[in-house]
Amino acid sequence: MVLFPSSHRYVCFILVPVLKFKPDSLGVEKMCSLDYSPYCIPFNPNPLRSSRKIRIICVGAGFAGLTLAYKIAHEQKLGDMIDFAVYERQNDVGGTWLVNKYPGLTCDVPIHIYNLPWAPKHDWNRYMASGHEILQYIKDVNARFKLDKHITFDTEVLEANWDGREGKWKLKIKRGGEILEEQCDVLIGAAGTQNSTPLKSTIPGLDTFRGPVVHTGAWDESLDCNGKSIAVIGNGSSGIQAFGALQKQSRNITHYIRSATWISLNYMSQFTRNGDGKNFQYTDKEKESFKNPATLLAYRRSLETASNGIFKNLVFDETSQDVKAKFRAGMEKVMKERLKDSPELAEKLIPTYQPWCRRLTPGDGYLEALQEPNARLVADPIEAVTETGIRTKNGDFTEYDVIVGATGVCAPDMPNFFTIGCGPNFTIANGPVLSALGFVSDYILRWATKMAAEDIKSICVKNEIIEA
């Protein structure tokens, strides 16, 4: 189309030639006319959507952060589009499994489905692996794939503020005692939920206790609990695992709980020895057989199939009522059988709510430990802690040498902020958790790639979706 001005208006002539692509000296192809070569049609040499390289910062170098690093470095190879860094406040990889070191720490699912899908391990020692063995596995994976080249250790993110005008996160970080400022286009929280600051107890007088007060999320490995009188506060997973381990070495031990919880056999108990649900050691013969990739894959698939079968117990509709009723009856039966010599404990420990309203706790040996002569359970609320012990609201007072807190850890409108790991919008209703980390990482990187390729400033979940 060519425009010529006249005295009153522009006169338009439409040229419809045969077109071809013709490269210019800069290597940019232009569409030109065979018949009207003087009238090359002026196309913008820039692409329709301009791209840019974006910076991604991931906070945390546990399973989630390492999965993201592996995806970027080895699987999707996004180096030309993404500048990527991981900040880790500890001095090594491991996340939850580096920070948590309390007695009895164990994986609560079969370890062969708690592998990274891209780094399977054939020679796990136990069906439910110890925290120490899992941490060593994480370190081995990091070394094998050289993932720590993306990680800056001893770096704590103190603040993260969203700058909507620039479309960037402005970070304040602490490294080596120095406060620094950093910025990124995309911020990813991969610190998990068990690697956070231990939840400070609000129990009156706790800071007046003369003996050691230790939290399961910040365990003091130099603490000697042998022959001591111990109080454990809280009955989540860490409290139940720690209680079972500490009972064996304590002079006496008391478990203070706020509410009942479902204590299950180890998950997928049909795969345990004799189907008794107890943890067990893999034999050398079994470990040797798992060197065969086909054998290991078949075993892992059988575990995953059983794990996925749990999903039917999580569905809430009229078709699932019979399934849930049978599951609840089975759970009650197992707990009552394990507490058959202590019916008063069964009354305090078996919940009135439905299984899976709160995650089941596979407390291997916990119910048995509670029935030992040196152990007791207290369900009465704690009123105060004194210099020497704990007093409950009904007036019960007991002196202790050590108090163990198992009280958990500290937990909208966040543009360009994603989370990986156990937290909001995470796919762990069923299936292996580490596989889910990969799925979430893929999803995040799809968005990051789109932002880079299309020069998108920011994205954010709509409020109506959050509130739906």
Image: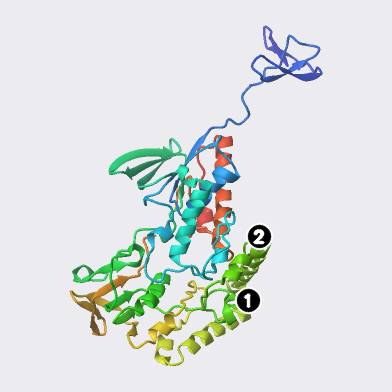
Q: Secondary structure at mark 2?
A: helix
Check the image and report above or below for 194 versus 42: below
The number of callouts visible is: 2
Q: Residue 171 location in percent, x, y? A: 37, 42
The image quarter containing residue 203 is bottom left
Where is mark 1, residue-wise?
Answer: 320
Residue marked by disc 2: 293
Q: Residue at x 56, y 47 (%)?
A: 71
**Residue 194 x, y percent position in the rendering:** 41, 61
Q: Is residue 423 visible?
A: no
Of residue 120 and residue 423, the one placed in the foreground of this image is 120
Select label 2 or label 1 by which is in front: 2
Front residue of 251 and 406: 251
Residue at image x 57%, y 53%?
438
Q: Callout 1: few (<14), some (14-19), or many (20+) C-alpha neighbours within 10 Å?
A: few
Say above or below: 420 vs 331.
Answer: above
Asked if residue 209 lies left or right of residue 354, the reply is left
Q: In this image, 228 relative to 169: left or right?
A: left
